[in-house]
Amino acid sequence: MDKSASETNDLRSFTCFEDYDRVPGFVISQTAYAIRKSIAKNIKNAGFDITPQEFAILNRLATHPTLNQRMLAELTYKDRPAVTRMLTHLMTKGLVEKQTCGNDRRAYLVRLTKKGKDIRDLIVPIAQKVLHQALDGTKIKDLETTIKTLHKITTNLNPQDS
């Protein structure tokens, strides 16, 4: 049996929907849910009225100071309507602001307000603490392999993004 046929047979155990605990998409989703749930709980317990998804927007705006909604959706892996709803909530809370983009009144850029930056900076250590707890006992080499593998999966499914 050649190597590719052998690898295909080996992959079958990871694509068998009778054993969901070995299907990468399910395990990834389960892990993401557990992290999001824990971050949400810790943010709420610290007295902040921010969801993990809203925090992701604040965080992206902190690292990319001015973005349009399309780029923000791409960077946070959210669809545009979801980003629109979150931006509306964040603007109501005074954490982000919009400004029109040139002559096109329909296009706008989004940026953090000072309050938004301050809130984001207070939430970062909370999220980091959750991630440290989640990664406890994980070897750096294993984590690096996992991240590399997840990037490979993403590239395989979104080749135009690479």
Image (cartoon, grey):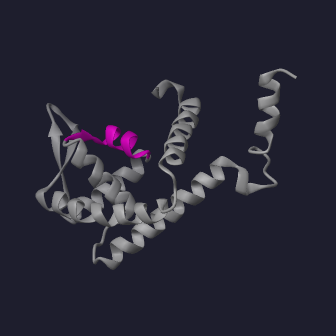
Q: Quadrant of residue 109?
A: top left
Residue 2: x and y in percent read 83, 20
Q: Verify whether residue 74 appears in magenta.
A: yes
How would you classify the magenta stretch by its main secondary structure? helix
Who is closer to the viewer here, 104 or 118?
Answer: 118
Find the residue positioned furthest to the right.
1
The residue at the point 59 percent across, 30 percent down is: 156
x 34%, y 75%: residue:
44
Q: Nearer the viewer, residue 101 or 58?
A: 58
Quarter location, residue 152: top right
Question: With respect to residue 29, does 159 lie above or below?
Answer: above
Residue at 52% x, 56% y: name it.
138
Q: Which residues are magenta?
A: 66-77
Locate residue 73 relative to residue 124 in the image: left or right. right
**Residue 17 position within the rendered picture, expressed as x and y whole percent measured from the top left:** 78, 51
Residue 150 pos. (x, y %): 54, 41
